[in-house]
Image: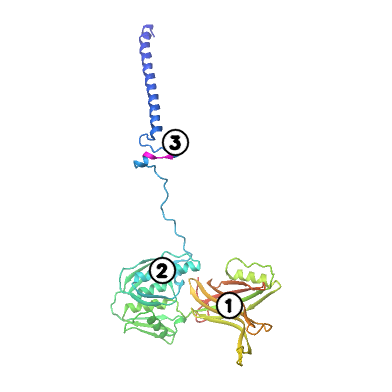
Amino acid sequence: MPEGLLRDLEPATTADMKRRTVFAMLGIFACFVISLVWISDGILSGSTAPVADESGRIELERNEVAGNAPLRTKVSDRTPPLPRPTHRPDQLRDFMLPEMEIEGLVLESALAKLKAAYEEACRFSGETPHQLVFDVPSGGDPLHLRLSARNLDGSIRLLGAVAGFHVQRQGAEYRFTKIEENRKLVKRTLEADPNLRNARILIADLTAQGLRLDPSTRVLLGADGRITLETMSAADEAAVMAIFDLDHSSFQHELEMKVIELQAGMDWTPPEGASLDPEQEMAMLRELTQRRGVDLLTTPTIMARNAQPATIELVREHIVPSETGEGGFETHDVGVIVLLQPSALGFGHQVDLNFREAVADYDQPPGSQFYDRTHITDAGFSANGASRLLMQTREDGSRVLVLLKPTLMDVTGRPAARR
């Protein structure tokens, strides 16, 4: 390149570089000033950076006042998933509830009361309930009826029938549609359940539920054991079918009990849990019967009606002179006396138990010769066919174990179909 051209370009290049240097220094100075402002005021273009005061505390003074507080950490507000039910919706036909009074409630409120009883029974029996849904019209006439011990599904259908609705279930949702009366004669023949061998039982049951039957309704029991329903009332037809599908209250509880005595000082620890399945019970009995100092007493198996008291007695009568000083004699029962009251609940049983072992000691002074050596009271839940284990330590250090196994039976003495 010619020397003249180089000389012409050199001054321009030097001046340009000077300008760039000045701009760079101005930019650096501007950044420094802005940084000072940010630190002193705590604000830079709406920033929410914290400011340290003289005591070292971190504050967001100006941003908080101005409504520009920093965004909080987001927390999921989604409802956690519900626990999975421990039974299928179709098993609601086997889920038993205690007796319940429906007095002056419309259908919607009566169903809410029934649902609450179902959830409470689940909690008591260790089940996880379904979230029942009722698609039912609001309002209606108040209901006045008594729901005896029934399965949940049948009780829902009975409430609907008494209120004049057909009931359909899909999963855990029940839909109620109004029954339309056409006053046409309907005749239906049904296979009679062993619990319903008497048509009068069925009619009495309908009346007890608070249902007023239409004059055209007749329920007949044939010689072949079948039940014939004749009616011109669609509501009566639905109600009779609801009753027919229910587990009748004449089912029974088979109660089997074993009493085991362990001598004082025996090193034995009972299995965990108050309820034993048949395999656990067999393993425990096998272990105990191989030891010395163990006495096993098996009481007679009895049948008890639902929610009715029953008694097991293995006693001897002791007749002694009266302690009143007026002559005569007194009778004392010595032995094992057990008072029981079982009720179907959920898929099992709630059993109230009062166990007494009365003994006689004639070395004691009069008035103290007869006393209870063992006294156990309990009210709890037992799964169907499982044994409830109760234990008490006596004053002398010996122990007594009580195994109570309830099984639901129909009136023919066969195990009722349960889960």
Which of the two residues, 148 or 243, is positioned nearer the viewer here?
A: 148
Asked which secondary structure carries label 1, the reply is: strand
Q: Which residue is mark 1?
A: 355
Asked which secondary structure carries label 2, the reply is: helix
Q: CA distance from mark 1 to mark 3?
A: 76 Å
Q: Residue at x 42, y 64 (%)?
A: 131
In reply to whether residue 101 is colored magenta, the answer given is: no
Give the percent coordinates (x, y) of residue 166.
Answer: 34, 72
Rendered position, 92 above or below 25: below
Camera-side mark, 2 or 1 = 1
* Res 54 label: 3
Q: Which residue is mark 2?
A: 115
Q: Earlier in the sequence, mark 3 or mark 2?
A: 3
Q: CA distance from mark 3 to mark 2?
A: 62 Å
As shown in the figure, which amino acid type bears the numbered disc 3?
Answer: Glu
Left or right side of 162 for 404 = right
Q: Are marks 1 and 3 in contact (CB under 8 Å)?
A: no
Q: Earlier in the sequence, mark 1 or mark 3?
A: 3
